[in-house]
Image (cartoon, rainbow, N blue to C red):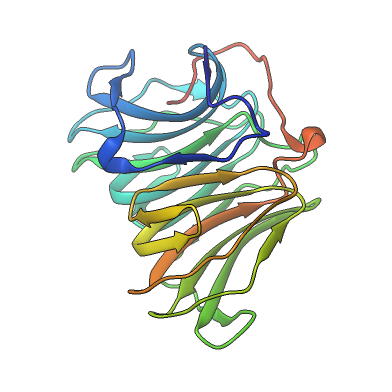
Amino acid sequence: MQVRADFSRKEIVRLAEAEWVPSPQSGVTRLMLDRIGGEIARATSLVRFEPGSHFPFHVHGGGEEILVIEGSLADEHGVYPAGTYLRDPIGTSHAPQTKEGCTLFVKLRQFSPDDTLRSVIDTRSQPWIRAGRDGMAAMPLHDFDGVSTYLIRLRPGLRLECNFHPGGEEILVLEGVFCDEDGTYPAGSWIRSPVGSTHKPYTEEGCVLFIKEGHLRPEKRYAFEASGINAQ
């Protein structure tokens, strides 16, 4: 299976226009944002767990990255409320479950083999730092070998100069409405911009964004064909 697998294209998915599909596990649905492979895949998805649902124990053959957007996720290692950012490197394992239900942003099988640090960050309790110019604040989440992941908060009415993305950029709009010359992106929208692309971001009402940069260079687009159950 291939879903938005041409990384030379700018891709946009708005939540209101997207289709959720059942996963093989009862009570779990997903919105496929990009995917290369079947149930074992290099994949980026939004995943919904119904209250009381679970996913079988599995090993992360190529690593797993999660941002808990709504609700609360749990496994044998802890409980992760909304706003938690998790990184489970290659070879880690868990059996996720939820009592109240949850919505997750998940990236599978995209870790560098050298990136071995497991991390859990509660973004609701982390400080914001000034970034770039007045009206911008950032929250760094992860930085490894030219790939950066962070949250950005933009104040209402902010307009930025042309941004250049030498390693590509991926955005998930968490709050508010984000805009550029190609469109308007309400909360839940996903934008993937290719290597070498540019745009002019702005926001009228303010927004909070999850951003990943540098990971779309061909040598950074890790995809592992490991055995085991795909996590989501």
Residue 124 seen from this side? no
Residue 104 seen from this side? yes
| Side of 173 relative to 170 (left or right) | left
Report the residue at 67% width, 42% height from top.
194
How many numbered marks, from 0 up?
0
Report the residue at 68% width, 36% height from top.
111
Q: Residue furthest bottom?
A: 134
Place of residue 54 in the rendered image (x, y in percent of width and height, measured from the top left): 29, 27
Q: Is residue 84 above or below residue 140?
A: above
Q: Is residue 169 above or below residue 139?
A: above
Residue in the foreground of this view, choosing between 44 and 57: 44
Q: Which quadrant is home to the C terminus?
A: top left
Q: Residue furthest front?
A: 181
Report the residue at 36% width, 30% height from top.
31
Place of residue 135 in the rendered image (x, y in percent of width and height, measured from the top left): 50, 84
| Side of 122 relative to 205 (left or right) | right
Residue in the foreground of this view, choosing between 128 and 229: 128
Report the residue at 20% width, 39% height from top.
99
Residue in the foreground of this view, choosing between 220 and 232: 220
Q: Quadrant of residue 224?
A: top right
Residue in the foreground of this view, choosing between 91 and 13: 13
Place of residue 154 in the rendered image (x, y in percent of width and height, measured from the top left): 46, 75
Place of residue 106 in the rendered image (x, y in percent of width and height, measured from the top left): 47, 38
| Side of 36 relative to 26 (left or right) | right
